[in-house]
Image (cartoon, rainbow, N blue to C red):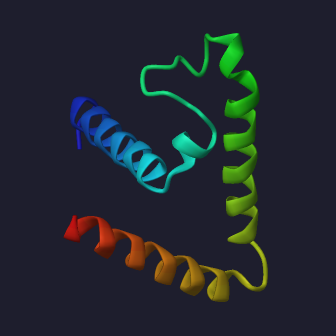
Amino acid sequence: MDAMSFRKARTRTLIQVGGLVEKAGLLQALNIQLGDDLQQNSECFENTAILMGALIDACKALHTNDRHAQKILWAEVGKKMLKQRDKT
């Protein structure tokens, strides 16, 4: 894969991950508005830090002895939400 193809694929994946964060309700729960500049807007700093902390905790959970059980639990919750969203 050349550098341009890699950049396009990486960008597509990052956009899709951002979409999942939105679908999960994290933006709404943290009062992060679409269009907010999370890096430059100092008013967004606290909510950005909370989101980052939550993602770090999720990552840590995947590095524990119970990671398999955690993955199963998260998969069930995620599948249920994705199926509900597909119906609407």
Give coordinates of residue 6: x percent, y percent. Answer: 29, 39
Which of the two residues, 84 or 63, is positioned nearer the viewer here? Answer: 84
Side (left or right) of 31 relative to 43? left
Give coordinates of residue 83: x percent, y percent. Answer: 30, 75
Q: Residue at x 56, y 31 (%)?
A: 32
Side (left or right) of 56 relative to 3? right
**Up/down of 23 relative to 3, above or below:** below
Q: Residue at x 60, y 45 (%)?
A: 29
Side (left or right) of 21 relative to 79? right
Q: Hey, which quadrant is residue 68 in on the image?
A: bottom right
**Up/down of 9 relative to 74, above or below:** above
Which of the two residues, 12 or 25, is positioned nearer the viewer here? Answer: 25
Give coordinates of residue 47: x percent, y percent. Answer: 70, 32
Which image quarter holds the C terminus?
A: bottom left
**Up/down of 35 relative to 85, above or below:** above
Q: Residue at x 56, y 76 (%)?
A: 74
Q: Hey, which quadrant is residue 87 in on the image?
A: bottom left
Which image quarter holds the N terminus?
A: top left
